[in-house]
Image (spheres, grey):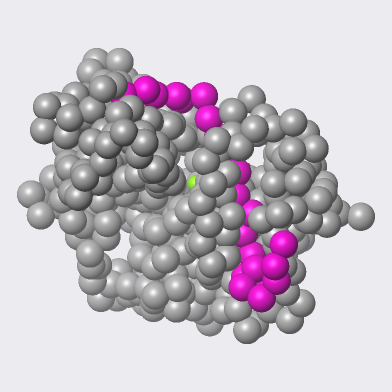
């Protein structure tokens, strides 16, 4: 007997047929004698619609009300999944964030989970009931619903797995594992039977949305065994194995580059002619961080005449708020103008092998040059190289790099 958390993403619960189908999959695990908790996302497309409604009413909407709206998608699917399970004769009960409770901080819209007590859920599971948990939401210190950022149901699943001390956290999605890159844009991508936590963490953080970054962070910290697999494979036992996220030393044959990720959710801001003096970066990035805006790549040019240009990237959705923050601070910072460009994409190559092998960045630059793709910004970490390019070159760049690093399936 094992204790398993099964998480189903948006496409896996996209309509009533899919919900019935995954309920059968849950029943199969229950019938095999396992204790199961289920975590669900909203039906595919629902969250996008809810987000769009908030933005249409006001681009600078209140984050607490945004959370009140966007968290509803998961409430629908949790209730429907419980009904589907009950109609198959499986004892089940839905749980929303505030009921467990899943306690978060107060960063509405991208809250972090602070704690969850699994005792009640464990006792229900031991009594043969399947808890069906709303992914993506918790409750903040202000006693209001807080959502965990897009893709946050993965993190809910890992948090539930840690709280109930599950043997495994199975993330069911519309691909059958983690691939060397998004198989939707590179059909020759290869499935990785195992991927190291650190590589998965980097890939997720630079755009491989198969797992939310925080879910990998939490799994690494809490030692949760995460498996990514397809809910579309045969529900009666013919499943293909998925991908396991494991410690680096559990991987025998390590590649220099494990995978390539892209993010189209990027925007570039350039602040022209900022005075080049101590404290200027703090004056720019302090207020942005207080507004909950994360910046990523930062480039500051050398000043010629006492002023300089500062370029950085941020999430495209944060662009209106960042613009408002900089406009408000213009007199204090003292710059000429802000230029924005939302037509950019970030392409990253990731692999633990980079620690010991030179030449990964050079191969990236040569490959992009051969395709006449201009690199606008570069940033690196120990196991990653990222470049910012024009959004229209995203697919061309990812495909060319996938081939250049020898990742294409033969
Ligand atoms: P869910 O709704 O189940 O959470 P997501 O759409 O969030 O599903 O994540 C699954 C998608 O992630 C896949 O359909 C695939 O297009 C994309 N993806 C991006 N990079 C990768 C990768 N390296 N391996 C597998 N899938 C990836
Ligand atoms: N429904 C949420 C989203 O679309 C959470 C998730 O799917 O993980 O972002
Ligand atoms: Mg997802």
Q: Position of residue 274 (x, y in %)?
A: 26, 33
* 283 is higher (above) or lower (below) than 169: above
Magenta-highlighted residues: 338-359
Give the quadrant of residue 217.
bottom left
Residue at 12% across / 27% down in the picture?
331
Q: Residue furthest left?
A: 142
* Left or right for 277, reference 257: left
Residue 353 highlighted magenta (yes or no): yes
Q: Nearer the viewer, residue 27 or 299?
A: 299
Q: Is residue 191 visible?
A: yes
Give the quadrant of residue 220.
bottom left
Residue at 21% across / 57% down in the picture?
104
Where's the C terminus, which quadrant?
Answer: bottom right
Q: Nearer the viewer, residue 269 or 181?
A: 269
Q: Is residue 147 visible?
A: no
Give the quadrant of residue 178.
bottom right
Residue at 7% across / 49% down in the picture?
142
Q: Position of residue 95 (x, y in %)?
A: 29, 54
């Amino acid at each position: 007997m094992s204790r398993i958390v099964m998480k189903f993403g948006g496409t896996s619960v996209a309509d009533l047929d899919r919900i019935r189908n995954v309920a059968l999959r849950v029943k199969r695990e229950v019938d095999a004698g396992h204790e199961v908790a289920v975590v669900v996302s909203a039906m595919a497309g629902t969250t996008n619609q809810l987000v769009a409604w908030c933005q249409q009413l006001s681009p600078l909407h209140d984050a607490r009300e945004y959370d009140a709206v966007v968290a509803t998608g998961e409430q629908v699917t949790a209730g429907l999944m419980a009904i589907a399970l009950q109609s198959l004769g499986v004892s089940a009960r839905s749980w929303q964030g505030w009921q467990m409770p899943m306690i978060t901080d107060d960063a509405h819209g991208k809250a972090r989970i602070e704690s969850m007590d699994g005792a009640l859920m464990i006792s229900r599971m031991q009594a043969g009931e399947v808890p069906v948990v709303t992914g993506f939401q918790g409750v903040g210190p202000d006693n209001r619903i807080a959502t965990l950022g897009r893709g946050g149901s993965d993190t809910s699943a890992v948090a539930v797995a840690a709280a109930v001390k599950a043997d495994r956290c199975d993330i069911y999605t519309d691909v059958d594992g983690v691939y060397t890159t998004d198989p939707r844009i590179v059909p020759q991508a290869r499935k990785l039977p195992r991927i190291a936590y650190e590589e998965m963490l980097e890939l997720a953080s630079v755009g491989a949305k198969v797992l939310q970054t925080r879910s990998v962070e939490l799994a690494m910290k809490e030692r949760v065994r995460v498996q990514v697999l397809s809910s579309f494979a045969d529900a009666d036992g013919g499943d293909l194995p998925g991908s396991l996220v494991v410690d680096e030393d559990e991987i025998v044959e390590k590649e220099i580059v494990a995978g390539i990720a892209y993010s189209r959710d990027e925007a570039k801001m350039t602040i022209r002619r900022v005075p080049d003096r101590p404290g200027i970066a703090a004056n720019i990035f302090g207020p942005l961080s207080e507004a909950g805006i994360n910046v990523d790549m930062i480039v500051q040019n050398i000043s010629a005449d006492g002023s300089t240009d500062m370029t950085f990237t941020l999430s495209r959705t944060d662009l209106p708020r960042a613009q408002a923050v900089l406009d408000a601070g213009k007199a204090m910072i003292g710059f000429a103008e802000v230029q924005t460009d939302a037509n950019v994409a970030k392409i990253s190559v990731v692999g633990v092998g980079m620690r010991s092998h030179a030449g990964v960045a050079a191969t990236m630059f040569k490959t992009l040059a051969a395709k006449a793709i201009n690199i606008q910004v570069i940033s690196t970490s120990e196991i990653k190289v990222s470049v910012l390019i024009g959004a229209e070159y995203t697919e061309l760049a990812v495909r060319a790099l996938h081939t250049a690093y020898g990742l294409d399936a033969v």
